[in-house]
């Protein structure tokens, strides 16, 4: 399964609602996770199984989707959210999206 | 709390071998598949290998098939990645994973 993330670069302002997309080449059956990676750090798990929030992750992060189309939403962008975000499917094999780099406008 | 601690990284010459280890704690290790994932500097993420609970089934992408071997010791709560015939393109941070949870990673640099 190939994963396509869009956009590859997103500029937004503090307080904005931000939506990141991840589209699979086949049905992912909700076996999709989202990771946040800040510069020089290991990826951090945010969301698993499409919409389950990992312990300790702020509630402004949420996930949704089904079939081939999935979304990560940040309800109110904070400065510390500047990072690259990856989606990951584990339904059929194990593959990653190319990432969305989120920056402040 | 799940903990995954990778060791064994370092600088190695092209064509040589290196073995990574990952010690797991905080869960029943023998009940879970385990994985290795890597990230080349400045690049995206790539799944490297998977192993089932008893070690009887292993999986690899074409990029490492025939060169890398994943194995596990359920008595020691450890998963390994034996990397042979290393290439410059294998330079990356290697992460051990249990389901969607990852360790902090270990750096492997392949260079002469």
Image (tube, coloured by chain):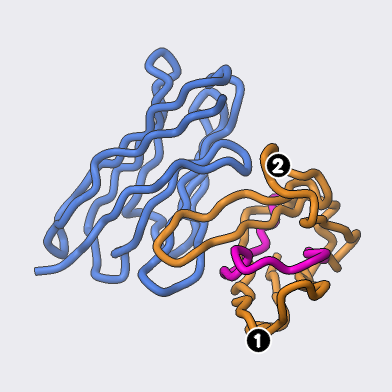
Q: What residue is rendered at 63% in x and 65% in y?
A: A81
Chain A rendering hue:
orange
Q: What residue is rendered at 78% in x and 64% in y?
A: A74
Left or right relative to A96: residue B17: left
Residue A3 image offset from top left, x and y in percent = 70, 70
Question: Would you name the residue on which mark 1 appears?
Answer: A105
Which is more toward the observer, A23 or A8? A8
Q: Secondary structure at mark 2?
A: loop
Residue A59 image offset from top left, x and y in percent = 79, 49
For mark 1, does the 10 Å Cα neighbourhood hold few (<14), some (14 to 19), or many (20 or more) residues?
A: few
As drawn, A28 above or below B36:
below
Which is more toward the observer, B42 or B78? B42
Decide which of tag 2 and tag 1 comes sooner along the chain. Answer: 2
Chain blue in the figure, letter: B
Question: Would you name the residue on which mark 2 appears?
Answer: A54
Task: State if disc 1 and disc 2 touch (CB < 8 Å).
Answer: no
What is the magenta range? Answer: A71-90
């Amino acid at each position: 399964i190939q994963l396509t993330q869009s956009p590859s670069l997103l500029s937004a302002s503090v307080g904005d609602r931000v939506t990141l997309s991840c589209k699979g080449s086949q049905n992912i059956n909700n076996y999709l996770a989202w990771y946040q990676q800040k510069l020089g750090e290991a990826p951090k798990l945010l969301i698993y199984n499409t919409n389950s929030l990992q312990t300790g992750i702020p509630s402004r992060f949420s996930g949704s989707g089904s079939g081939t189309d999935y979304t990560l939403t940040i309800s109110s962008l904070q400065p510390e959210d500047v990072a690259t975000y990856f989606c990951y499917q584990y339904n059929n094999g194990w593959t990653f999206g190319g990432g969305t780099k989120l920056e402040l406008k | 709390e799940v903990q995954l601690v990778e060791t064994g990284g370092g600088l190695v010459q092209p064509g040589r071998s290196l073995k990574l280890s990952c010690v797991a704690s905080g869960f029943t290790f023998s009940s879970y598949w385990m994985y290795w994932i890597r990230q080349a500097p400045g690049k995206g993420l790539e799944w490297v290998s998977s192993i089932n609970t008893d070690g009887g089934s292993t999986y690899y992408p074409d990029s490492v098939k025939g060169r890398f071997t994943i194995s596990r010791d359920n008595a020691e709560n450890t998963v390994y990645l034996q990397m042979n015939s290393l290439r410059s393109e294998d330079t990356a941070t290697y992460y051990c994973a249990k389901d969607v949870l990852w360790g902090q990673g270990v750096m492997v640099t392949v260079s002469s």
